Image (tube, grey):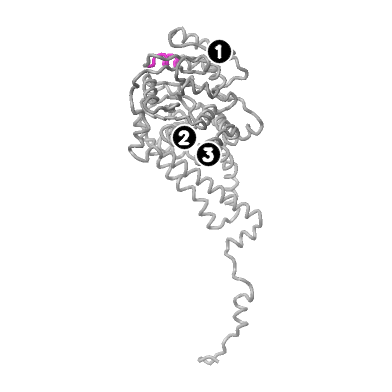
Amino acid sequence: MGSSGGALPSADGVQAASGGNSPTAAPLHIRRSAALGWPGIILYAVLGVISLILFIIAASTLWWMLHAWRSPDALASTGFRRRAAGRPHSFSLLLPARHEQDVLGDTIDALARLDHPHYEVVVIIGHDDPETEQVARAGAARHPRTVRVVIDDNIPKNKPKALNTALPTCRGAIVGVFDAEDDVHPGLLRLVEARFEESGADVVQSGVQLMNVRSSWWSLRNCLEYYFWFRSRLHFHAEQRFIPLGGNTVFARTALLRAVGGWDRNCLAEDCEIGVRLSTRGARVAVAYDPKVVTREETPGSVSALVKQRTRWDQGFMQVYRKGEWRKLPTRRQRLLARYTLAMPFLQAATGALVPLAIIGMFVLKVPVPLTLLTFLPLAPTLVTVAVEAAALGEFGKEFGIRIKLWDHVRLVLGAFPYQLLLAAAALRSVWRESRGQGGWEKTQHANAHRDPVAA
């Protein structure tokens, strides 16, 4: 009896009210997962893995984008420190061109007017390309002391085969590579030879910049992508002694190129491949980006051209990864960086294929709260990246004399997701082509859009 005179409930009654001998009820999200069975658990795992991969990609990309801006001294070190060398070096400038009759003449004339006493321009033309050969021969006739033409008889043709055709004929101590549409600054060679002399480098990678920011909805993002790659990220790779070199405005000692056998004749990313191969041999690479002397280029002229260009690059990276030369790098840190860099097309393709399925699953199924929060994890570095891109766009405009308008910033933000979809599509296409053994060279057409003044 209690003090109030009422009967106390029995122990059996208490147990019955609490569920008898049953264990404590599981949290709601665990009960939902159990109700969904293995398909639901697998979907949750896929969502979690995708979120973590996207976060790693976004965070690492942001870190490398900001590498050059980590301090004022770091930013200053990205440019050319000395303006002239103590003694002049000799250069052989290789200019492979295929079906480039519309743009090649301007490039030959520009290269023939460079401010340097000891250099030659070697234009490499396919034997089955009479229109481009005619332009090249005319250029050689205008500049007989500087320009000569070499015929590439390889079948099928590609850029590394053309470069290897000309390499044995080079007379200069340093070989430089340019593309048929390049707009090259007259004073570049003086700066490059000074960089060789001051750094003792075996390779010098100078800056390349896409310029036609308003020619299409994606061109602005494409231009900024180059800006961050050459201004910041390649400097990071050079410091780590592992670098996928750029495809042009890159200079290497002729003896070194011949010693390693030149370029991989079957690789779709011959620039990346030779950069990796030289890195494994301990070659020292110096990188320099000066807005005043960057080599100016244009973005692809259509969505399909952009996708094909990225497909070729991605497939080339996969070829370099599969070749395995990077495994010879001396340190684990270098090998880890190489694996991550070269595997990026795989990651982009995988996320590109799985993200739509994950999004559908999030709407169809009730996702647990912790997993929902995890899916928002990549959003943080992504938002910071957009802010950094907006700031960089203003700096880009000041450095290149382009008036950046409010609409340009709007296009930058609105184009972020569609542009990433294009890159994912290109990565998926590269995996498909590589799996089917399709290694043909899909050439990017050029129209000299970068030589036209940008609207103010």
Residue 109 lies in the magenta stretch: yes
Residue type, label 1 = Ile
The earlier-in-sequence mark between 1 and 2 is 1
**Residue under circle 1?**
151
The earlier-in-sequence mark between 2 and 3 is 2
Q: Residue 435's x, y, as percent?
A: 65, 34
Image quadrant holding the C terminus, namely: top left
Q: Secondary structure under badge 1?
A: strand
Q: Secondary structure under badge 2?
A: loop
Q: Residue 176's x, y, as percent?
A: 46, 21
Q: Is residue 4 left or right of residue 190?
A: right
Residue 230 lies in the magenta stretch: no
Which residue range is magenta in the image?
Answer: 106-114
Count neighbours of disc 2 (C-alpha within 10 A) and say few if under 14, some if 14 to 19, many if 20 or more: many
Badge nearest the viewer, 1 or 2: 2
**Residue under circle 2?**
241
- Which numbered circle lies on residue 435? none
- Which numbered circle lies on residue 335? 3
Count neighbours of disc 3 (C-alpha within 10 A) and say few if under 14, some if 14 to 19, many if 20 or more: some
Q: Secondary structure under badge 3?
A: helix
The earlier-in-sequence mark between 3 and 1 is 1
